Image (spheres, helix red, strand yellow):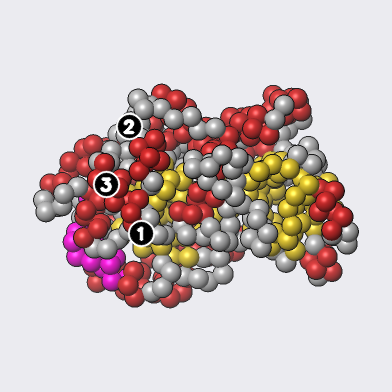
Amino acid sequence: MMRAERGELLRAPLFHTPRNPFLLQDALECHWDGGLLIRDGRVADCGDFEAVRAANSEATTVDWRGGFLLPGLIDTHVHYPQLRILGVLGRSLLDWLEHRALPEEARMANDSYARNIAGGFIHALASHGTTTALVFGAHFASATEVLFEAAAHAGLRIISGLVLSDRRLRPELHQSAEAAYQDSTSLIRRFHRDGRLLYAVTPRFALSASESMLEVCQTLMSEHEGLRFQTHLNENTLEVAEVAKLFPWARDYLAVYERFGLGGRGAVMAHNVHPTDSELDRLAGQGTAIAHCPSSNAALGSGLFPLRRHVQAGVRCALGTDVGGGTGFGLLKEGLQAYLMQRLAPISLVIDSARLLYLATLAGAEAVGLEHEIGDFQRGKAADFVYLRPPAKSPLASIVEDAESPERVLAALFTLAGSECVREVRVEGSVVYRSSLGTL
Ligand SMILES: [Zn+2]
């Protein structure tokens, strides 16, 4: 208790982006000999170590030099029931869903199976430095409940919901509109705003949700305050064509969701690899965010995400790992993949160090409507962070020792830092993961 009141002062180089580097210059803030003061789970101060120390001489100092502090990473699109299908290669979206993803998702009907996956999933997020995630739950209420329970137990910030579908998947994954409404309502009552948990209404995608199911989503959104919304949009050209056939009245894919009022601040739609200009304008106008999942887009051959068009239209974008269409839980790796693909995009855009960090942190907070609480180290925000420290004698350790600028260090971290570098992860100042390698 004494320690909490006096505060804990972490000494390490620290980086954060309190501003959007796609819009502003000098958005990256770095304190090379940095001090992050944590008191009662909040950021009480952040700056140069000596200055923070002088103003808070009673705080307990922890010397973490040799490593780096970043705000907790935020994954805006990840599927909990797909942990075990990571690493399936060589298929495209609809084929991959039918033969790999959906059979595995059907196994979540078994509670003990789901509990085992939920534990592994939460551990995987934390051990990769992810402190907040917007997660597709399961098609089964009990398996979705198990995920919320595992997240609460571990202390992560999880926003999730029962996945809703009533056609074109597998019969055991379909619900009636009535059951979808009742199961969602009881999960919302139990978990929404319970500690760090939030609920997101989650129709899988327009392809598997009839108009009456989308109406249920609309009703749920109107009946409870502060709910988030998540779904998929314009991922694959075949999927886009199928959606057009199913909803002949809709001018495009986004119009299906718009008809039911599904979108706006706190709504996140994954992928949007194949948008029209009109869709981009409308997404920007609504404040709907896009979860960009570059590893998944490459692995499933979905296409090259038009990031520059999104930025120019003013659409919010953040990063998603899209486990298991993607290639793993690491958001730093996801940032690197975004960088690589944008280098090759027909209308390319360089994602520099500041933009990488922003996409993996504050942009995610903005996407899920938590930017006042998390995403950077501004005073008063929750002390959610990841402490990265390259293993001794690794190429990364050698590079950062000799790096000439903060930008150079960040670029090297995004390129080379895997989960072996994640030494400690905290949410509101509490440890949610500590590497068995130790922090020193
Ligand atoms: Zn997905």
- State the residue in front, 264 or 324: 264
- State the residue in front, 420 or 335: 335
- Name the amino acid type tagged 3: Glu
Q: Secondary structure at mark 3?
A: helix
Q: Residues within 10 Å of mark 1 (few under 14, many from 20)?
A: some
Residue at figure coordinates x 43%, y 45% from the top left: 317
- Name the amino acid type tagged 2: Gly
- Name the amino acid type tagged 1: Gly
Determine the main secondary structure of the stretch shown in magenta.
helix
Could you tell me residue 19's position as x and y percent? 56, 48
Asked if disc 1 and disc 3 are in contact, CB closer than 8 Å, the reply is no
Q: Who comes first in sequence, dot 3 or dot 2?
A: 3
What segment carries the magenta color? 207-220
User: Can you see residue 11?
Assistant: yes
Q: Secondary structure at mark 2?
A: loop
Question: Which mark identifies residue 279?
Answer: 3
Residue at figure coordinates x 17%, y 44% from the top left: 242
Residue at figure coordinates x 61%, y 31% from the top left: 411
Residue of label 1 = 264
Could you tell me residue 352's position as x and y percent? 54, 32
Residue at figure coordinates x 15%, y 52% from the top left: 250
Residue of label 2 = 303
**Quadrant of the snapshot with the N terminus:** bottom right
Could you tell me residue 56's position as x and y percent? 84, 59
Q: Residues within 10 Å of mark 2 (few under 14, many from 20)?
A: many
